[in-house]
């Protein structure tokens, strides 16, 4: 066989990514009964073979640090390491998916709920005894059946990544491949938890008492799900006008919502279509699907805005960039754009202009948004700190469940179940990408406000700037580099603290 070249790897790598992405789109949009991934992996096995890994390792080691060649090589190697680790655990993942589809949670009093619906049932349960009984039954089942599968998958993935010999241990390898200093981010998280502790202690009792009617010290993670499900504002967010309102917002900002026809809005009713909105970049930038089945309600709006941010990013990426800048890279960037859009749900002016939320409800709505934001951020800070221990290797695996429950409870006050220690994990530090995305959207919002005023979301000059300076670049840069380039600022939690303080004021 002829030696694999960089050009050939880019070409077939892109074909492989497109094939996988199209398969997911067809299955999740209800256009195909199930995703058939195995034939695709077979067809493109050379892309995920030892030759490809060796080529990208060689490119990475030989490229001069600080050069564009090194940047490309790092992105390609990170993509290879992730994909090959994914293939190494594919059989376990299939077992997990099959288990999740078939498992049933049975409570002591004879109730049976499919595992996939149980989180929704817990959030919707208005009777607290029923809610806790359901969650206890779920936790017992997870501990018996799902947790061992997840633990094995995490261990195997860690072993595979460590075996690449790029750096000492999983954490340092992740840092070398991703360009993210995950330990420095975890230190920022610790500081954020300290800085917002007093604010949290002050605001939590009000929400717990009002919605749950129990003392703060008794509240559990299951209670938190019910608390965050708050339906009181749903009537202001009807499904019928969602797409139209958001298209108006994007158009007023000076961006074609379809990105010149490249973003396809798949909003029709179809059996088998997922109920949550999602974005499927099938060819970047030429063919991107934004799939939605509008139900209405606050969370439907948030999800749609989030996915729209992804869709515009992929649909407006420069076509002349190499595969690795368009398809891979630091997902903190695309998640940051998605969050920049979904955070309009915390923007007073945006809410007034594009939704039916009435003026008298606005202060209560914004205060609830501030509480939710703080809860989610504190939870993610704790998750990252815990996941760093999980991947770090210094704590024996059998001690992780207690560490998980302690860490999450300390940050959020809610009692967590130890059985979720291997299930409530974002593999490969995806929590770090979300946390950086949160920071990035806050910096971008401040920059957009400085440049285009508070109502930048309807300033016709803002969209072209975003297309040129942000979306066009794909994910060539790290989120930190992007923030420095467009805002002259490092990523930090400072602007997030400021915005939460404003919301809670
Ligand atoms: Zn996202």
Image: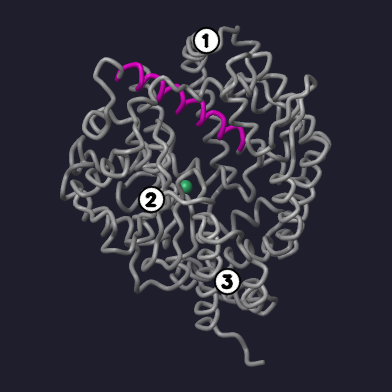
Residue to which mark 2 is pinned = 267
Q: Are marks 2 and 3 in contact (CB under 8 Å)?
A: no
Relative vertical location of residue 175 with respect to residue 223 in this rendering, above or below: below
Relative vertical location of residue 318 with respect to residue 215 in this rendering, above or below: below
Residue positioned 73% across, 59% down in the render: 89
Residue positioned 43% across, 38% down in the render: 492
Could you tell me which quadrant the N terminus lies in?
Answer: bottom right
Q: Nearer the viewer, residue 393 or 50?
A: 50
> Dot 1: what SS?
helix
Residue to which mark 3 is pinned = 60
148 to the left or right of 40: right
- Tag in front: 2 or 3: 2
> Dot 3: what SS?
helix
Residue to which mark 1 is pinned = 205
- Tag in front: 1 or 3: 1
Q: What whole-number distance in Å separates the C-alpha atoms at marks 1 and 3?
A: 52 Å
């Amino acid at each position: 066989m002829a030696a694999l070249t960089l050009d050939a790897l880019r070409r077939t790598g892109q074909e492989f990514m497109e094939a996988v992405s199209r398969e997911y789109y067809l299955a999740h949009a209800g256009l195909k009964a199930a995703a058939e991934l195995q034939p695709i992996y077979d067809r493109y096995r050379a892309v995920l073979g030892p030759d490809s890994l060796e080529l990208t390792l060689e490119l990475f080691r030989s490229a001069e640090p600080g050069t564009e060649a090194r940047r490309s090589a790092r992105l390609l190697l990170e993509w290879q390491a992730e994909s090959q680790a994914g293939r190494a655990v594919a059989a376990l993942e299939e077992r997990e998916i099959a288990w999740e589809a078939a498992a049933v949670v049975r409570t002591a009093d004879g109730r049976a709920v499919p595992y996939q619906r149980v989180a929704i049932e817990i959030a919707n349960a208005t009777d607290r005894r029923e809610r806790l009984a359901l969650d206890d039954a779920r936790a017992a089942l997870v501990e018996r059946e799902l947790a061992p599968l997840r633990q094995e998958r995490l261990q195997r993935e860690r072993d595979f990544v460590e075996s690449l010999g790029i750096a000492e241990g999983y954490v340092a390898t992740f840092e070398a491949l991703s360009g993210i200093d995950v330990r420095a981010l975890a230190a920022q998280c610790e500081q954020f938890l300290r800085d917002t502790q007093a604010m949290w202690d002050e605001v939590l009792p009000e929400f717990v008492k009002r919605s749950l009617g129990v003392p703060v010290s008794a509240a559990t993670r299951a209670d938190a799900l019910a608390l965050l499900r708050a339906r009181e504002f749903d009537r202001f967010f009807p499904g019928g006008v969602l797409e139209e309102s958001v298209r108006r917002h994007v158009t007023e900002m000076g961006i074609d919502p379809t990105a010149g026809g490249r973003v396809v809005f798949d909003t029709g009713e179809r059996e088998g279509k997922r109920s949550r909105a999602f974005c499927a970049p099938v060819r970047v930038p030429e063919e991107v699907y934004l799939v939605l089945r509008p139900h209405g309600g606050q969370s439907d709006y948030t999800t749609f805005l989030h996915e729209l941010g992804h869709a515009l990013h992929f649909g407006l990426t420069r076509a002349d960039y190499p595969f690795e800048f368009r398809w891979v890279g630091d997902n903190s960037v695309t998640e940051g754009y998605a969050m920049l859009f979904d955070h309009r749900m915390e923007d007073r002016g945006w809410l007034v202009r594009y939704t039916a939320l009435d003026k008298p409800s606005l202060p209560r709505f914004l205060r609830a948004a501030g509480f939710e934001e703080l809860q989610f951020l504190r939870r993610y800070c704790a998750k990252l700190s815990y996941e760093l221990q999980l991947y770090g290797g210094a704590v024996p695996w059998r001690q992780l469940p207690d560490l998980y429950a302690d860490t999450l409870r300390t940050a959020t006050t809610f009692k967590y179940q130890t059985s979720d220690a291997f299930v409530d994990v974002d593999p490969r530090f995806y929590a770090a990408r979300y946390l950086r995305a949160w920071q990035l959207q806050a910096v971008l919002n401040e920059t957009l406000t400085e440049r285009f005023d508070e109502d930048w979301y309807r300033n016709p000059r803002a969209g072209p700037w975003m297309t040129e300076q942000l979306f066009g670049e794909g994910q060539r840069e790290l989120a930190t580099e992007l923030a420095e380039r467009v805002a002259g600022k490092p990523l930090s939690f400072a602007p997030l603290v400021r915005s939460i303080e404003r919301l809670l004021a």
